[in-house]
Image (cartoon, helix red, strand yellow):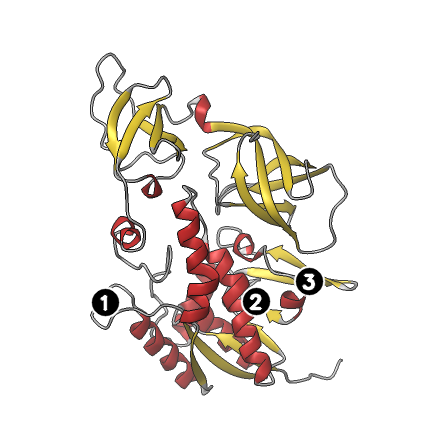
Amino acid sequence: MPHFIQKHIMIGMSGGVDSSVAAFLLKKQGHHVEGVFMKNWEEDDTDTYCPAAKDMADAQAVCDQLQIELHRINFATEYWERVFSHFLTEYKAGRTPNPDILCNKEIKFKAFLAFAQKRGADFIATGHYARLEKNKDQFLLLKAHDHTKDQSYFLHALNQTQLSQSLFPLGNLTKKECRQLALQLKFNNHNKKDSTGICFIGERKFKNFLNNFLPATKGSIKTLEGKTIGTHDGLMFYTIGQRQGLNIGGVKHLPEAPWYVAQKEMATNTLIVVQGHDHPALLYSTVYAKDIHWIGDDPILPLKVTAKTRYRQEDQCCIIKARTAHVWQIDFETPQRAITPGQYIVFYDKLHCLGGGIIMNTHLSH
């Protein structure tokens, strides 16, 4: 039996049940574990929406129970410069970004990793549901055992160096098992609601939050045929495929069917809408992506894989083709609905996450 070697591990503690159970599992294995609570947003003292104080108290309570030290570090400056500024730029350009992926790449697995390394840690760990496997000289990112909670989509932008120094203790657990373990351990946060959306926005209305940083300009809502049927509050507030919040009433000479956002014309500040959940204008067989990152070696193209154009989507069969050095063409076997510029397309070979990139558009620009 191989001799156990104790490792120094720093784990990101969010105050939630996942990171709490992950910390317990590492401590149970006999490692020297320290917690790190990352504050990534400078909320107002009067701000009742950001639960940072409650989260930190929950993280401290678990660390006290496990008898591990909790470090409190502020990455608000790094978050603003590396994540939030990009978030605003993308919205201003009419795209719909996913800051969680950039936060993982730039904050949790870069700034946090650097912090841990300076303190002599061998590894960092998080409560993500994903698995790692070493194959010869490369690390493979695999889907979690619980496919309903798998978070490899959010980790696809990590590189070999980051993965080689990371641990995901929950990779083989289901969410139900995680909560049951937290209950057995009598963690106060065992039934705490999972965080959703962008952490610093909390329960605020997203439209009000975004309006604090980007001035909105109202414009026309038009049909594909060019008929004006309403007014939008600002293109940045809408995403492709959206149905809610359009405030389009009955339109004369048109059927009573729901309207969906099909396009955002930035040049004319016009929102184009169509009727019907599966209108042809919402379905695309081809997508173009940029900034493709491969976790392992660059593949030989064309390559048949599966892909997700949004989190929780079922894997979709596609073929990856290179068009230029920087733009990749992906052709789907089945047309995909509401592919959204600014979001990420992530590629898989069965359980193996290969990498991904940023969706540019669903047509060639000339």
Whether residue 31 is visible, yes or no, is no
* CA neighbours of label 3 inside 10 A, class few (<14), some (14 to 19), many (20+): few
Q: Residue 311 location in percent, x, y? A: 48, 47
Residue 2 placement, left or right of 39: right
Q: Earlier in the sequence, mark 2 or mark 3?
A: 3
- The picture quadrant where one finds residue 115 is bottom right
**Depth check: 139 or 237 in front?**
237
Residue matched to label 1 = 47
Residue position marked by numbered label 3 in the rendering: 133
Q: Position of residue 304 (x, y in %)?
A: 70, 37
Q: Is residue 198 left or right of residue 319?
A: left
Q: Is residue 89 above or below residue 20?
A: above
As drawn, the label of residue 168 is 2
Q: CA distance from mark 3 to mark 1?
A: 42 Å
Which of 77 and 362 lies nearest the eye of the viewer? Answer: 77
Answer left or right for 138 relative to 201.
Answer: right
